[in-house]
Image (spheres, helix red, strand yellow):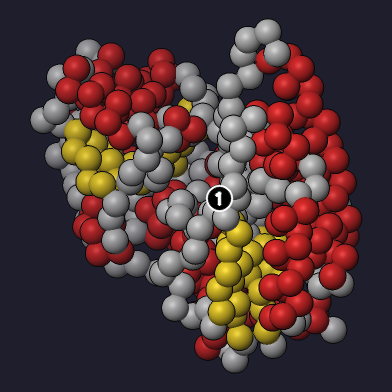
Amino acid sequence: MRILHFHDAPRIHGGATAYLKQLLPQMAARGHENVLFCLDEAPKGFPDAVATDFFAYQRSESALQRRKDFHHFHPPLAEHMKQWFMAQSPDVVHIQNCAAFRSTIFPTIYNIGLPILMTVHDFTLIDPNPFGLDRSGPTGGLRNWLDKLSLKADRKRVFTSAELFLCPTEALRDGVGFPREKSRVQRLPIQPAEVSPLPSDCLRLFFAGTLFRSKGVDLLIQALSSSSDPELQRATLLIAGTGDLEDNLKTSVADAGLGDRVRFLGFCDGEQMAKAYAESNLQVLPSRVPENSPLTVLEAGARGRPSLASHAGGVPELVPPERGWTFRSEDVDHLRQQLESIAHDLPALANRGAAMRDWVRTEFAPQRHWDSVDACYQELAR
């Protein structure tokens, strides 16, 4: 079977990209041919794709034209897709993330007559402004209204065009409102990992992700710098990842006098991530936006490390009190209070981490996940 995989931004080292890099070799091992289409730039680091292509959007200087391109039918993209997709003759199209050009992408694939399977990684189908664009100023209200109109139209197109949605959490399926007959809850695959003893001398925090405003690392730094609790003042923080706020975050750390306690690791490969997890005893995810099924929470859990994460999206489903902690999103005071409480009860880290490890091993078994995806391909191709 020939599977055409679609991903909008593989250059962003987030959960969707990490998932796709696991998916392709798994499907190749099952005898499928993988082809890959992306937006923005040529895909790199996907050796299991037998053919790749991309569409490079020529960004207009006009905000009005950009809105027209992104939120309405964009003929250059549609024609490019139509020619390449038909030349590849896939049996199924498997879409990962797709927040931009939905008004073009879904109808184009649907009109070609190809069945669409979508693994849903985020809540952008209920967010009228998923890229966090500035909506202030005298025209802000109008742009917000237009965003909501576009989202309403996009949801209708997506729900009509796709035949099956795979949702990693119930919160995502129910929160977005996918048609029940077209949606299934399917946990992500998490590889079993070696479990090392948790450091017990003090609170050792770890954040892994893109350093964008949406991830809220600045909130974590504020919580650490504003605490007068002696135990939390001993806590350390490792930050893995890159992004447009990296320099600002480093400046904030220096200005707060946290330079000896906070270390930036940059982009980390698998071995470096494993080392960082081993040096930590609590994974922190202070996102401003609702997270679906964050890989860092699950990968930390596979290693017996619990998480403290924003109480939004799929996080409460993954991190109930017996497996970790949550705090009110964007509430720095509540985040600090939770950190201080945990810093005074280090044995709770091992207890909740062990519960998280056992749950991840049961619910996120990789082989079961890949078998299920393969079965979906067979079902849709028929």
Q: Is residue 350 above or below residue 150?
A: below
Please tell me which residue lies in front, 222 or 21: 21
* 153 left or right of 95 in image: right
In the displayed structure, 95 sits above or below 246; it is: below
Quadrant position of the N terminus in the picture: bottom right
> Which residue occupies the foreground of this view, 314 or 56?
56
Whether residue 57 is situated above or below residue 219 in the rendered picture = below
Q: Residue at x 66, y 42 (%)?
A: 123
Q: Is residue 379 above or below residue 158?
A: below
Q: In the structure shown, which secondary structural element does the residue marked by tag 1 occupy? A: loop
Q: Is residue 168 left or right of residue 193?
A: right
Q: For the residue marked with disc 1, what is the amino acid?
A: Ser
Quadrant containing the C terminus in the rendered view: bottom right
To which quarter of the image does residue 255 belong? top left
Residue 204's x, y, as percent? 23, 39
**Disc 1: which residue:** 293
Is residue 202 something one can see in this rendering?
A: yes
Q: Position of residue 109 (x, y in %)?
A: 79, 65
- The image quadrant that residue 111 belongs to is bottom right
Residue at x 68%, y 84% (from the top left corner)? 2
Residue at image position (47%, 69%) is 21
Which residue in the rendered view is the most extreme toward the bottom?
31
Residue 325 shows in this picture: no
